[in-house]
Image (cartoon, helix red, strand yellow):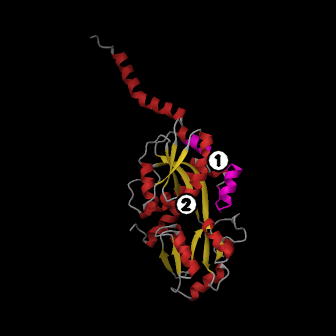
Amino acid sequence: MKLPHRRQFLHLVAGAAALPAVSRLARAQAYPSQRITMVVPFAPGGIVDIIARVVAEGMRPRLGQPVIIENAGGADGSIGTGRVARAAPDGYTLIAGPWNTHVANGVIYPLQYDVVKDFEPIGLLADAPMLLIVNKAIPANNLSEFIAWLKANPDKSSMGTAGAGSPPHLLGLLLQKETGTQFRLAHYRGGGPAMQDIVAGHIEGMFISVAAALPQVTSGTVKALGVTAQKRSPAAPEIPTMAEAGLREFYFSLWVGLFAPKATPRTIIDRLNAAAVNTLADPGVRQKLEAQGYEFPPPEQQTPEALRAYQKAEIEKWSPIIKAAGIKAD
């Protein structure tokens, strides 16, 4: 059998080595050719789930393929997030990753993945500012009066949280730090049970999403003292921001971003970003989410680069607070 000349042999070797790259490029150009799974690392019905389902439905016609929501909760979202970190970087497994999973969990949990390095950002979807609410029996009708009441009654009141390390927990710690007040933090398995105990008078207040709080605020069973956004919520324009109420720079929103596994081709990232951005520009989508108190980033903050910068800034801001509080997974 005659062996090929050396030059021919080298061409054959080079061609074989290039096949995987050519194959990946071809797949990226044909993307998407099958359904896409968007993992929500929490149970159905919560903030992340609501945003993800509305956005996924809007992306479907723009991608020409179904975008299926799969709820994979556990360990404050780290189980579902870890699954996406290990998924193939082909654009068919994404995660609706909120502040919890892509900021706080990197400090709280001993993760087997890196919340920054193991994901490709696609774009910021929406965010949910929090309301500070208190029991209607509290003798305070605004934030200044509530802070004065807390100072006059140190360690005699309790603020609820949605669990250790949750946004309400960290906001409670931040409130103590910024106001010099002392109160207990009672951890619940979610915001719903905590809200029930506020209404019943077992605890004095908590930070909770606008959407979850508004029915009780409207019915008069709780008082709303401030929203943790930089501007008033369109869903409740009568409620002042925390800054307007007297606490400057007291901002927080439970944001949700769309991420893919590390090494997902940029052509796929761009295709997904365009579908998400166009969905968020749809008046029907915006009306549906704004009515529930959700907010949208401006166009310049909807790029992959903007999401990465925002995520890193949030990690830089909150990591010292979480570490100083000694919050660790149980």
Which residue is at a point 53% across and 32% down the rendered structure image? 30
Answer whether residue 289 is visible to the viewer in this image: yes
**238 lies above or below 304:** below
| Eye-nearest disc, 1 or 2 | 2
Magenta segment: 269-296
196 horizontally vs 297: left or right: left
For the residues marked 1 and 2, what is the alpha-carbon distance in whole angstroms? 21 Å
Give the percent coordinates (x, y) of residue 187.
Answer: 47, 74
237 lies left or right of 38: right
* Magenta-drawn stretch contains 282: yes
Q: Which residue is mark 1?
A: 279
Regarding mark 1 in the picture, which secondary structure is present there? Answer: helix
Question: Quick one: label 2, few (<14), some, or many (20+) residues within 10 Å?
Answer: few
Under mark 2, the amino acid is Gly
Secondary structure, magenta segment, majority class: helix
Residue ranking furthest to the right: 238
According to the picture, the residue beneath numbered tag 2 turns out to be 45
Q: In the displayed structure, does residue 319 sit left or right of residue 144?
A: left
Q: Is residue 141 magenta?
A: no
Q: Position of residue 280 (x, y in %)?
A: 65, 50
Instruction: Note whether residue 114 is visible.
Output: no
Quadrant occupied by the N terminus: top left
Q: Residue at horizontal 40%, vertical 66%?
A: 329
What's the residue at 57%, 61% (across, down)? 47
Q: Position of residue 69 (x, y in %)?
A: 52, 50
Count numbered badges in the picture: 2
Disc on the earlier residue, 1 or 2: 2
Hey, what amino acid is under mark 1?
A: Thr
Residue 128 - label: none
Instruction: Tell me if label 1 and label 2 are in contact, CB under 8 Å.
Output: no
Q: Which element is circle 2 on? A: loop
